[in-house]
Amino acid sequence: HPKYHELKSKRTSFGWWLSLAGMLAYYGFILLVAFNKPLLAQKLGSGVTTVGMPLGVAVIVFTIIITWVYVRRANSEFDALTEQIVKGVVK
């Protein structure tokens, strides 16, 4: 069914882009930990919080955001295509 190929193509492409974004965030943070510890160890203000803590939290929040983006698109565009496929096959 042509709509199935369209759905598969769009979903796969979008999934790869979001996976790449997530991997860049995670591996970028890990590379900072491995190669630039002094940057991550810098204190923010006069407290005990370092630069690494908000960056680590940002990676987690970024993951939640890209998951939300995928779910939002899946619930609108991908579900609509799936419904069209089912209607086309049932006929």
Image (tube, grey):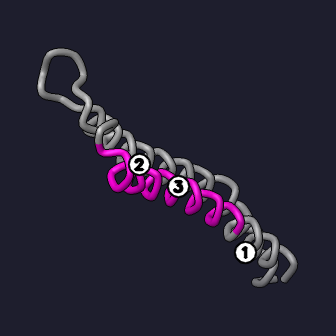
Secondary structure, mark 1, is helix
Looking at the image, residue 63 lies above or below residue 82: above
Q: Residue drawn 13% across and 20% down? A: 47
Using the image as rendered, state which of residue 40 and residue 63 is in the foreground: 40
Q: Earlier in the sequence, mark 3 or mark 2?
A: 3
The answer for how far apart the CA atoms under marks 3 and 2 are is: 15 Å
- Residue range highlighted in magenta: 13-37
Residue at the disc numbered 1 = 8
- Image disc number at residue 24: 3
Cα distance in 3D space between marks 1 and 2 = 23 Å
Q: Where is residue 60 in the image (x, y as percent from the top left)?
A: 35, 48
Whether label 3 touches label 2, CB < 8 Å = no
Q: Mark 2 points at which residue?
A: 64
Residue at the image position 87 percent from the left and 78 percent from the top: 2
The amino acid on which the numbered mark 2 sits, given as a three-letter code, is Ile
Q: Which residue lies furthest to the left in this view?
A: 48
